[in-house]
Amino acid sequence: MGMLSLDNNLISKESGEYSAEESYEFQKHAESGYRIALAVPEMNDIAGEILAHHEHWDGTGYPRGLKGDEIPQLSRITAILDGYAKWSRNQVDEVEVNKTAVDKLSEGAGHQYDPELVQMFLDLIRK
């Protein structure tokens, strides 16, 4: 939801390509999504999870620097699905998409992502 507040050119960039200003703008989307969810009564219950979906397992994420189990489980799941979708976008070869996404999620397990949830997700997509 908060991605609606971002310029399409910013959305299409890889995270390592952001200038300091672009990084700041991108990071605000979690808070924008949170505010949108608070404004919609049916979404109030998940507003906190939306805010936390860019927190990292090792505490290096944003906006609050939550770590491990401090991060709501729905936020941890959303982060994995968001990453998988990002690495699957604009790919032609389905096998290559899966390999890239699996590699990226595996690399991020324990750093960006909950390692147990990554393993569960990878087990599911391998079936």
Image (tube, helix red, strand yellow):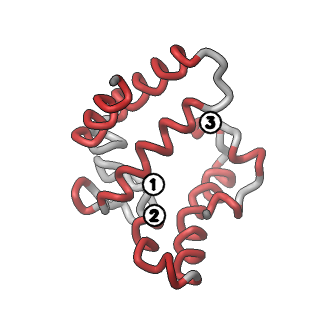
Check whether the beta carbons of the residues at disc 1 and disc 3 lie within 8 A of each other: no
Residue drawn at 36 percent across, 28 percent down: 107
Seen from the viewer's position, the closer of residues 94 and 26 is 94
Task: For marks 3 and 2, give the CA distance.
Answer: 19 Å
Examine the rendered structure and indicate whether residue 37 appears above or below residue 30: below
Find residue 15 and report its horizontal and vertical position in percent: 58, 40
Horizontal relation, residue 3 to residue 66: left or right: right
Residue 71, how many percent across, how many down? 30, 60
Q: Amino acid at mark 3?
A: Glu
Q: Nearer the viewer, residue 30 or 64?
A: 30
Q: Residues within 10 Å of mark 2 (few under 14, many from 20)?
A: some
Considering only order in the chain, which callout, 2 or 3, is on the residue closer to the N terminus?
Answer: 3
Instruction: Give me the disc on residue 54.
Output: 1
Residue 127 x, y percent position in the rendering: 33, 24
Q: Which residue is mark 2?
A: 63
Secondary structure category for the residue under label 3: loop
Q: Residue at x 34, y 43 (%)?
A: 113
Earlier sequence position, callout 1 versus callout 3: 3
Q: Amino acid at mark 2?
A: Pro
Q: Which residue is mark 3?
A: 14
Q: Name the residue at 70% across, 40% down.
A: 12
Estimate the x, y position of residue 67 in percent, counting from the top left. 27, 56
Determine crowd level at label 3: few under 14, some 14-19, many 20+ residues with C-alpha closer than 10 A. Answer: few
CA gap, disc 1 to disc 3? 15 Å
Give SS at disc 2.
Answer: loop
